[in-house]
Image (tube, rainbow, N blue to C red):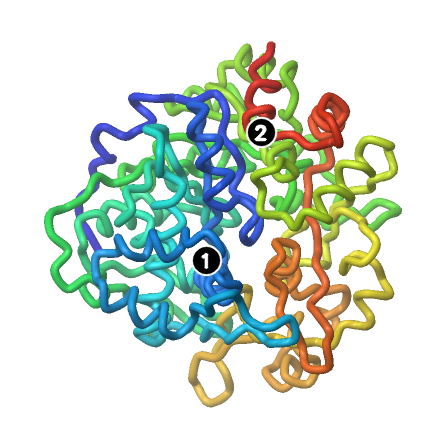
């Protein structure tokens, strides 16, 4: 790991401070098409780095109809890597309607070399395509809870000259130093939590070597800026306290945002719908964070022109918005899902709730109740429990003293055999498969079944309603979202 403790020089965010950051949503939802459209408008477009290896593999197996993935792979620094990926996953015309997607191996503390190469290449492709045709900034969003593929994902993004890394769902303390080391093509390592292990056991560090993927990487690259997504004053203050952990800015996210949310402080309390209850202990001291001297964006319920103006009046550079962009034409959500959400939001019948049990991570997760999705109890009960992606698995020390992985959403017998408790399985959803399905990349199953989707959204739907009602057929573009937000 690099020992350089100086913050990134000439950070893109010291030169350009866009008032609008498009949220890095879901698995394939914040894809390159959406990010490119937003960046082309002079704002910060963001691609999602979650399960990016699986997303690219399934796009190739779906035929890569316009040739975009193959075009980007042609620019990957190691042609041999691009060649084996195409040989393994590309299917001209797409796989048959009843065929299964070829699986992608699961990451471990020592992932297979080809899986590491696939992950690096996938992140490279996503950022490369997002940056085509404009000079705007492009970011990549990663979740600290999903740590095993993180170095490979970030390295691929840096190879494609990503401008900003956004990190939430845990403390991003390691990320500023990590991206500086990766930009210099240095060997790095990140902490991995292994349940049941002590720090002295030596299991808690996962190494990554850029030169194992790119043998002759050339000169150092410009390190991207880092935006820490936080929900507490204490975390922001701690991160800003040392050069090694100090980000280039903060996104302060409120609990009404879509996807994963920070859990409330204090004893766990729920309302009549089972949603976590937040109180004054969860209110962030904005003035204290502004006093740290770093740019700040506000997120969660800031998706209207009035809220954008309010955020800027409070001293923020601007806002991060996810939900309005999530249901725009360029979003990666399946078209039928977008149509349902727009229609139900417009007529006031859409319910979005915070589910404390759905996500295997243990973080509250916003779920939009839609018929035919996993939020429908009958659909959820009908799904056979399968864990073939393992993105949200956690590491633990088994009785033999070796590191293994488990997930409360995996099959019951497997989870209990690994020492998991039955109470932890109640209400859990296989987000890995469900979120891929929401982006139209759901796995087929033997017998003709297809993985059902799960839709996440913020609970503030004002922008979706306004934009749907203002455009013919309810359709609206990412540019429409930007123009709407900046109208004030």
Please provide percent x and percent y for residue 351. Answer: 82, 42
Identify the residue under disc 2. 284
What residue is rendered at 46% in x and 19% in y?
317
Dots 2, 1 in contact, CB < 8 A: no
What residue is rendered at 34% in x and 26% in y?
13
Identify the residue under disc 1. 52
- Disc 2: CA contacts within 10 A as few (<14), some (14-19) or many (>=20): some
Q: Nearer the viewer, residue 51 or 264?
A: 51
Q: Nearer the viewer, residue 334 or 17?
A: 334
Q: Quadrant of the N terminus?
A: bottom left
Does 414 sit above or below residue 486? below
Left or right: residue 354 compared with residue 386:
right
Location of residue 474 (image quadrant): top right
* Separation of marks 2 and 1 at Cα, in angstroms: 32 Å
Does 179 sit above or below residue 91? above
Please provide percent x and percent y for residue 55. Answer: 50, 60
Does 38 sit above or below residue 100? above
Could you say whether the residue bearing mark 2 is in a helix, strand or loop?
loop
Please provide percent x and percent y for residue 353. Answer: 78, 45
Residue 105 in sight: yes
Left or right: residue 297 compared with residue 150:
right
Q: Quadrant of the C terminus?
A: top right
């Amino acid at each position: 790991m690099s020992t350089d403790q100086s913050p990134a020089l000439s950070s893109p965010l010291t030169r350009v401070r866009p008032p609008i950051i498009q949220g890095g949503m879901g698995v394939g939802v914040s894809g390159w098409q959406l990010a490119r459209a937003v960046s082309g408008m002079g704002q910060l477009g963001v691609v999602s780095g979650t399960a990016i290896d699986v997303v690219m593999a399934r796009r190739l197996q779906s035929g890569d109809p316009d040739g975009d993935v193959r075009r980007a792979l042609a620019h990957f620094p190691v042609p041999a890597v691009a060649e084996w990926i195409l040989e393994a996953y590309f299917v001209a015309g797409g796989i048959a309607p009843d065929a299964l997607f070829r699986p992608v191996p699961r990451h471990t503390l020592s992932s297979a070399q080809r899986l590491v190469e696939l992950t690096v290449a996938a992140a490279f492709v996503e950022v490369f395509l997002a940056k085509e045709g404009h000079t705007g900034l492009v970011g990549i969003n990663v979740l600290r809870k999903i740590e095993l593929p993180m170095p490979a994902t970030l390295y691929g993004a840096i190879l494609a000259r990503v401008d900003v890394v956004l990190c939430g769902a845990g403390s991003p303390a390691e990320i500023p130093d990590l991206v500086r080391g990766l930009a210099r093509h240095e060997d790095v390592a990140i902490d991995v939590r292994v349940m049941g292990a002590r720090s002295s056991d030596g299991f808690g560090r996962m190494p990554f070597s850029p030169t194992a993927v790119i043998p002759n990487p050339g000169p150092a690259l410009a390190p991207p800026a880092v935006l820490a997504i936080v929900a507490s004053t204490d975390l922001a203050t701690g991160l800003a306290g040392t050069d090694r952990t100090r980000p280039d800015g903060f996104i302060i996210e409120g609990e009404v945002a879509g996807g994963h949310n920070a859990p409330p402080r204090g004893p766990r309390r729920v309302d009549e719908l089972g949603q976590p209850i937040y109180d004054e202990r969860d209110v962030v001291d904005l003035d204290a964070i502004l006093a740290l001297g770093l740019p700040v964006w506000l997120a969660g319920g800031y998706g209207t022109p009035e809220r954008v103006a309010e955020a800027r009046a409070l001293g923020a550079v601007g806002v991060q918005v996810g939900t309005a962009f999530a249901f725009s034409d360029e979003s990666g959500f399946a078209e039928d899902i977008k149509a349902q959400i727009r229609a139900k939001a417009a007529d006031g019948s859409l319910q979005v709730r915070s589910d404390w049990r759905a996500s295997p991570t243990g973080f509250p997760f916003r779920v939009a109740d839609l018929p035919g999705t996993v939020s429908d109890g009958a659909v959820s009960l009908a799904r056979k429990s399968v864990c073939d992606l393992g993105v949200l698995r956690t590491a633990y020390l088994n009785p033999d003293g070796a590191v293994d992985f488990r997930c409360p959403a995996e099959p019951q017998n497997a989870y209990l055999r690994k020492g998991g408790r039955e109470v932890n399985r109640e209400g859990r959803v296989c987000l890995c498969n469900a979120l891929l399905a929401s982006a139209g990349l759901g796995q087929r199953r033997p017998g003709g079944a297809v993985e059902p989707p799960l839709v996440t959204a913020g609970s503030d739907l004002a922008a979706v309603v306004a934009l749907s009602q203002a455009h013919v057929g309810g359709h609206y573009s990412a540019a429409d979202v930007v123009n709407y937000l900046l109208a004030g």
